[in-house]
Amino acid sequence: MEKKIGVYICKGCGIGEALNVDELKKATAGGAKIAADVIREHDILCSPAGLEMIHNDIKEGTNCIVVGACSPRVKFEEFDFPGTITERVNIREFIAWTMEPQNEDTQSVAEDYIKMGVIKVQKGDVPTPNILGDLSNAIMVVGGGITGITAALEAANAGYKVILVEKEAELGGWSAKLYKETPRVYPYDKLDEPRIFDKIKELEAHPDITIYKSTIVEKTDGQPGLFDVTLKTNGTSQTIKVGAFVMAAGWKPYDATKLGHLGYGHPNVITNVQMEEIAKKGKITRPSDGKEAKNVAFIQCAGSRDANHLPYCSSFCCGTSLKQAKYVREKSSDAVAMIFYKDIRTPGQTELFYKNMQNDPGVLLTKGDVTAVTDAGNGNLYVEAENTLLGEKIKVEADLVVLATGIVPATRATQEYFDALTEVGKKGDDAKKAFLEETPKPDSILNLTYRQGPEIPTLEGAYGFADSNFICFQYETRRTGIYTAGCVKQPMTMSDAADDAAGAALKAIQCVEHVAKGMAVHPRAWDTTFPDPMLIKCTACKRCTEECPFGAIDEDEKGIPAYRLNRCRRCGTCMGACPERIVSFKDFSVDIVGSMIKGIDVPDEGYRVIVLACENDAYPALDSAAIKKMKLHPSVRIIPVRCLGSTNLVWVTDALSRGIDGLILLGCKYGENYQCHFVKGSELANYRFEKLQETLSKLQLEADRCQLMQVAISEYDKLPAMIDDFMKRIDEVGPNPFKGF
Amino acid sequence: MAEHKKVLVIGGGFSGLTAAVETAEAGFEVIIVEKTPYFGGRVTQLNKYFPKLCPPNCGLEMNFKRVKNSGDITFYTLAEVEKISGQEGNYDVTIKLSPRFVNDKCVGCNACAEACPVEMSNDFNFGLNKTKAAYITHNQAFPFLYAIDGKNCKGSSCGKCAEACKYDAIELDMKPQTINVNVGSIVMATGWDIYDISKLDNLGGGKLANVISNMQMERLASPNGPTGGKILRPSDNKPAKNIAFVQCAGSRDENHLPYCSYICCMASMKQATYLRDQYKDSKASIFYIDLRTPGRYEQFYWKVKEDPNVSFTKGKVAGITEDPETRDLIVEVEDIMAGKKIKVKFDMVVLAAGMVPSTKTAKIPGDVSYTPDGFVAAASLKKGMYAVGTLKSPVDVARSVQDATGVAIKSIQSARR
């Protein structure tokens, strides 16, 4: 489109008092080389009269709008001009509210900001969505337990075709093996019938659901909307096209053979899973002699909350043991159930069930650490415990012992296998070959043909659980269009798993709907831009394919990146990674930001420092400091970026060679509890920064001139001082020697 | 595609916001109503989340951005549902909009608050300080518009705010409005209130100055709170370095709340880290019945437990009294593992007060039944009406998000006919 620029400067909210707007307009016309008559001002730009002025210009053909007013975080409805390229230049929060009024330095900040805004609309373009052809909106659900079945039903009931894949011959998973369920409704005193069987019936009768039993996913190729999934059923393979996945591969009980210290191996020491099988058959009988068990001991946290086994709580076992105690009591009125626990964990309303069970005189609850389970003759067992409430050691006899074993996610085995493979791979090809020959390969779940590996990355430090890293966003996996649900995410009860399944089904639906419109999914769900690499200039360095946090870029046989657009979340990490600077978005590119940086006036006297600020957290934090009217150093120029991962080093070297005295990269906290929605944005930026030190010293520049700062949105109160400290350091190292060249 | 019905979400806390943005991003139009002037609910009042210790305003900011960028969400603040009639696919809802006395021309400059002569208790900070009757709760509030408290404002007889406002944003004669909407489904996400600690007589709640609730502790530790994030005790604003956390304050107690409030164990451990991070010589003592850190939260417990200045004592607190001289507190507790009663002195006591569903006091004006504790009896809900998160049982933010996302799919099933 032919661009017609309009620049609008607001004088309200203290801007008119802080700045000489006439001078600013003149400087903009001169500096940005645009006609003086398209630069307008208004006392209150967001007022009806101010907006009318802009709308009138739009009617006259203005299509590139620079709004020099408040932060883009406010007045977003007022300054929304569809069909135009609009750039909000924040001269209220970043200048009027934070800098000395009517001061030469302050004035030059405004001149730079407006000029950068003009450059941005000159260089940018209106995005047109890239919609790939021949898309499928079918949802594939992997796993036919309570989670998978619930996800399938919810998606199908919302109007989508569903394909459900179960590796076993029967549907239902663990929930079909239960005798009863823990109470689900108030007053939580009656055990409920397993809900799974009705659900299976509904599933099998649903016209929009296709079920594959005894089937595994052999291979998953492609991307959201265009996944080609090869299924293998009893040796026969077929390929099905789907749009998105819910991955609900479930869990395995912790291997009880590792619980010898709790007596496992003795025929009358069983797991909670075995207890369900027994109860389902009728009376509570014990394996050794089929005698009815009258004194049943339950040992909680059998493997769970134990540094030697599972360092987490398995969440469902307290409720399950209370339920099984009720089996014991209901099936035989003179039977006794003894529960040994560390803490009873019945959160929320399940507490009411616990209270009901406490009121049963035949249920004995004992806090203590079980130290030994030994044979007592006649098939009976002694359970010994210490640290009990009375402070003494106790020893009781039971005729059946139930170990409340916990949850191991199905994702753990594959994760461990591939971790080990990566480790051994570092030792060379021979070691790798030997490993592959010797180690049995665990069943794959999705077997993605992605360059970054065949399974969904599990959460670091989460013992193989494929969970979201974010409390606020429970469905942020690192593979777009593949949403995990249920116990592959974390230990949870059946009811929680069913709720979780519904959520994952919704995310899968959103994904197919968004790719159909050429839009990104969370966290940039509104975004229709996309990375558009000029591959003809690619040198196949593989940085983008390695660094993409979402595995969106594969490689062709020559090592040239093959973008799978629908996997992309639009963070720009590839743009930051590329040494050839060939990756661009319509409104965000190496050239756009680079040109903005070049637009900054670098005077011979005084410092200039650029702050590249992550727009998710760092930018709102700067705004928040401004709202508190904290002072911002007038030497800094803030430029928002999608994510620090999109920072291309050429910006840094260009800035320094132009005489900019320093750069701050302001981004999210990284490490174990990282906050970056693009996983490693600030960490990658830091890594690239470190690599840059060498270049800096070649240019005889001090490494101190560049610093990455991690900041949380709540730390706005510390930000101005952090920047001032940086300025002090710049003052110590002195002006950039390239100044004036 | 057939015309879809809209979805109504009642409540703009994290659950309601999640339900709204998730529904909208699936391609449906959403109306969300919030009864206070701001979105974000309880989460905006928290300093950090457990177990990551990350700031809740980060996720809120992102959800606000989703609301701003979605063309499919209409939102109302100071809005309450008055009447619901109809059935799945066709609900008629009456919404009452209370006056904000500030219109959309507000630019957030603070001139009205500076001019306002009326001071009132700051509810956002649970009464720990005062605010003006023309106010904004905090600097990351959404929408970023001031509000005037109708109960405390003297109205046009004062009018100082209107004089101070250069933007014609004050309308002291603003009237309540009623709007009617037709929607296909209704998501109820009206959240929870903290249990009133003044009912905990033996623990000195509401009586002893230095006995505060866990939510008050969040405000004390928040950079945008009444003390700028300093943990100071209310009686004399001195640093509170030796703090007792009393678990199950009201919860798991037949005389108060019979259920477990789910979040309080993790919350107290988290608050112990606030204290330990702030003062090197501080001590946190946690008194509990059972420690409930389900799932991977267990790891957080282990990490907190490693700190020798955080102690865990199993035992129910019997009573709290005050030393009238120092205003220090004496906590009397039965140490169950040691088998004896102990008395310990503290600078401040934080009561891990429980969750009360908002529907305990404010019922949904439609066909909804409740348990005696005020929770929505979800199984008996009419088709097309869905309850989220803490309206069904106490849960944390993570589970509220899961549930709200799950309810979003139900709401579109009801709205797509």
Image (cartoon, grey):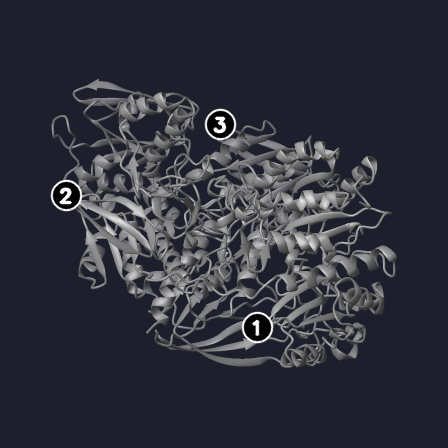
Helix, strand or loop at disc 1?
A: loop
- Mark sitting on residue B339: 3
Q: Toward the viewer: B284 or B85?
A: B85
Three-letter residue code for mark 2: Asn
Q: Residue at x 66, y 40 (%)?
A: A708
Q: Give coordinates of residue A405: x percent, y percent.
A: 31, 33
In the image, residue B121 above or below residue A306: below
Q: Residue at x 54, y 67 (%)?
A: B34
Q: Which residue is mark 1?
A: A82
Q: Kindly identify which chain the residue marked by label 2 belongs to.
A: A
Q: Residues at marks 2 and 1, common chain?
A: yes
Q: Amino acid at mark 1?
A: Pro
First in sequence: mark 2 vs mark 1: 1
From the viewer's perspective, tell me whether residue A329 is left or right of residue A127. Answer: left
User: In terms of secondary structure, where does tag 3 sit?
Assistant: loop
Q: Is residue B288 something one can see in this rendering?
A: yes
- Mark 1 and mark 3: span between their CA atoms? 71 Å
Position of the C terminus of chain A, as image quadrant, is top right
| Residue type, label 3 | Gly
Q: Mark 1 falls within which chain? A: A
